[in-house]
Image: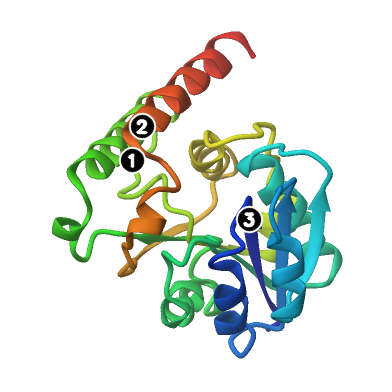
Amino acid sequence: MRLAVVVPAYNEEKTVGEVVRSLRPAADLVLVVDDGSSDRTAGVAVAAGGDVYSHLINRGLGAALGTGIAAAVARDADIIVTFDADGQHKVEDIPRLIEPIRLGAADVAIGCRVADRSRMPFSRRLANWIGNALTCVLFGIWVKDSQSGLRAFSRRAAEELDIKTDRMEVSSEIIQEIKRHGWRLAEVPIRPVYTEYSLSKGQSFFVGLKTAGRLLFNRLFR
């Protein structure tokens, strides 16, 4: 099966090269979406062997995922994995993540950072729990790690996925799409790599509060 990995990246010149190089032996396509970076993210990704799609301005994580997933479908991928550019994820987790989809037992798989939560800083654990709880309240589905950036989609699910949000709330929107379409979900334990750099990115407590506000607004007024 043809595997594409989508790597959304915004100002990730420090890590995106190594991420792309680690992914190339494991995937048929490594698609980096440079989301309006002001540094050398795009050039570093190309030099490492990635196929780069660029946004002229920073549009946000949701928009970058939408661009990358659409590109993967257009390039005939059978399974599409999303993978953060900050070095948090391990390429070794991908085979286990996609196995339920490869076997036809799931339409979507989410990598759950539950194997060793003690290594996750308290503020990050709190933000993650709030995201899980709010997602469940708004969309009626409990997921162990709704905010995880490591996910896999079957081609059918990727074709049906309709991402409307541009920013971090896309993680909860994907859970909403799982519920709306009745997709079969597999939750696969993964072991993230926490570094000072990776912890400076992503869904911190305060970013989580902003995301929660956007989710509530979208639910009530859209």
Q: Which residue is mark 3?
A: 9
Q: Quadrant of the N terminus?
A: bottom right
Upstream in the sequence, badge 3 or badge 2? 3
Residue 222 lies left or right of residue 184; in this view the side is right
Q: Nearer the viewer, residue 99 or 15?
A: 15
Q: Secondary structure at mark 2?
A: helix
Percent of width and height locating residue 176: 52, 36
Q: Which residue is mark 2?
A: 136
Q: Secondary structure at mark 3?
A: strand
Upstream in the sequence, badge 2 or badge 1? 2
Q: Nearer the viewer, residue 59 or 130?
A: 59
Q: Crowding at label 2, few (<14), some or many (≥20) Cα neighbours within 10 Å?
A: some
Three-letter amino acid code of the residue under disc 3: Ala
Three-letter amino acid code of the residue under disc 2: Cys
Three-letter amino acid code of the residue under disc 1: Trp
Percent of width and height locating residue 212: 42, 24
Q: CA distance from mark 2 to mark 1?
A: 5 Å
Q: Nearer the viewer, residue 201 or 62?
A: 201
Q: Quadrant of the C terminus?
A: top right
User: Could you say which disc has been placed on residue 142 in the image?
Assistant: 1
Q: Which residue is outermost to the top?
A: 221
Percent of width and height locating residue 160: 72, 49
Percent of width and height locating residue 155: 70, 65
Q: Secondary structure at mark 1?
A: loop
Q: Residue at x 28, y 43 (%)?
A: 124
